[in-house]
Image (cartoon, rainbow, N blue to C red):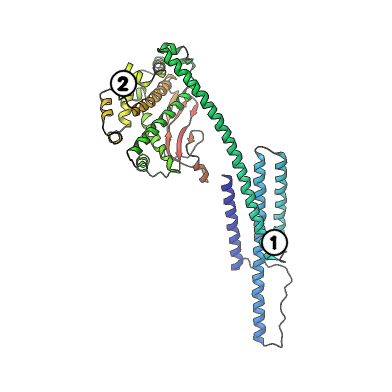
Amino acid sequence: MDSAKHLNKSRLARTFAKVLHIQAVTGAAKGNKFQKTKTREKVNHDKPIGESRQSVFFNDEDEKLRERAVLNAFLAKLFATISSVKAAYAQMQYYEFPYDEDGVWSADKSIISEFKSLTELKQSFLKKHIDDSSPETTLLSAEILEQKNLIKTYEISAKKLDSQKKLKDSEIIFLKEKFEELRRENKSIEKRLNSSGSLSSMSSHENLSLGSLTAHNFISYVKQATRSIRSLVKFMISEMESANWDLDAAADSIHPDIVYWDTTHICYAFESFVCREMFDGFNLPEFRDSSESMAQNEKRRQFFFDKFMELKSLKAREYIAWKPTSMFAEFCRAKYLKLVHPKMESSLFGNLNQRNLVNARKFPETAFFDSFLDVAKRVWLLHCLAFSFGPEEATVFQVAKGSRFSEVFMESVNEEAFLSHGSTPAVGFMVVPGFMVGKTVIQCQVYLV
């Protein structure tokens, strides 16, 4: 990002130089004559008058060319000095993080020195005391200095990027270690689950209670739901590719007229679609308006918390086999029929067998449906947990296309948008909804354009 800024500044400086050069050539700067000793050839009265006038004419043209050469050399020297300031400033930025006192002091000294040089150039121009002894040499020396400063600036940028890379590498190592730790912990939990054989034995290991719920508990289950949705989306895209789908056309049908920063980013469109369907009705009890919905009181909080505790330690398929007419089973049925269109299912799997089973309130035993059931479980748990907080305590929120990016309420899934925008980028579409838990904001994830 820093290197891009330096490149833009360099282009601006060159454009400015070209404008001044054009002004000099076209006569826009005629008033800037330089004080110097002009050697004009004396008119020889012994020669014909026409010949003397021709000699004076050529001398005037030579003088104008020389003035232009001197001005070009001066401008080249000016912009070479500006490039020195930029290089010194880049050096100072490099030493500021991590802070190096000697480096910052040295860079600051260089900046002051270059500003003095700029002041001297300004005074010589205003007083018309521009050095015209050897404009060709001055021009070449200035160009060489500017190229050296550009190289120095790029080298500093490369060092900064290398430092950032090393920092990211260390973060990756840390996250890998954390991942391995979590994987071992998950295996340990799975072993306890397999050996327990009942829900009550698992409950003894659970510290969660209705009175101890916090936003951190909710955030944890938001992350679980998001990971599960992304896993399902990968499965869907794999099946689409196997069925020779035009993924670009499919993504465009979800979010028309979006220009993606990278071809792989179309996966966010499918993720957005799954989230939109799965979280639709999240703020309503049972995900739908119902005359039978219980009042917003302590009894309802306890009801949803019990449903949460009942499902969270079981696999979704085990639960719906245990309670095939439960609220969760009905939720799975309704969401599958809404998420997977008949044409989509027929195209991906060659028939409508899964849909027919779901309509008959049976549940297919396929890898795709298992992946869907995991998403349904995570979203349902989040829903039950939200209603366990009490009225207006945990709700979902969305942002519209074209909204200005807000760091408070949004998290970008594509950082590329910040590198190319001079101003705050806009929302192309929402990928994952956000949540409010009391006064705590869980940012929604958005794709920026």
The image quadrant that residue 70 belongs to is bottom right
- As drawn, the label of residue 447 is none
* Nearer-the-camera pick, 429 or 97: 97
Q: How many marks?
A: 2
The residue under the point 65% across, 71% down is 64
Q: Under tag 2, what secondary structure?
A: loop
Circle 2 Cα neighbour tier, 10 Å, few/some/many (<14 / 14–19 / ≥20): few
Query: Residue 160 placed where, x, y %?
Result: 61, 42
Q: What residue type is labelled 2?
A: Ser
Query: Residue 299 placed where, x, y %?
Result: 39, 14
Split into 4 quadrants, where in the image is the C terminus?
top left
The residue under the point 66% across, 62% down is 139
Residue at numbered disc 1: 125
Query: Residue 307 placed where, x, y %?
Result: 39, 17
The image quadrant that residue 165 belongs to is top right
Q: Which amino acid does label 1 sit on?
A: Phe
In the drawing, does residue 134 fall left or right of residue 402? right
The residue under the point 49% across, 28% down is 441
Q: In the figure, 9 relative to 382: above or below?
A: below
Residue at numbered disc 2: 291
In the drawing, does residue 50 fall left or right of residue 412? right
Q: Under tag 1, what secondary structure?
A: helix
Judged by depth in the image, the label closer to the viewer, 1 or 2, is: 1
Q: Is residue 293 visible?
A: no
Q: In the figure, 80 relative to 324: above or below?
A: below
Query: Residue 167 placed where, x, y %?
Result: 59, 35
Q: Can residue 322 be seen in this view?
A: yes
Q: Mark 1 or mark 2: name the one nearer the start of the chain.
A: 1
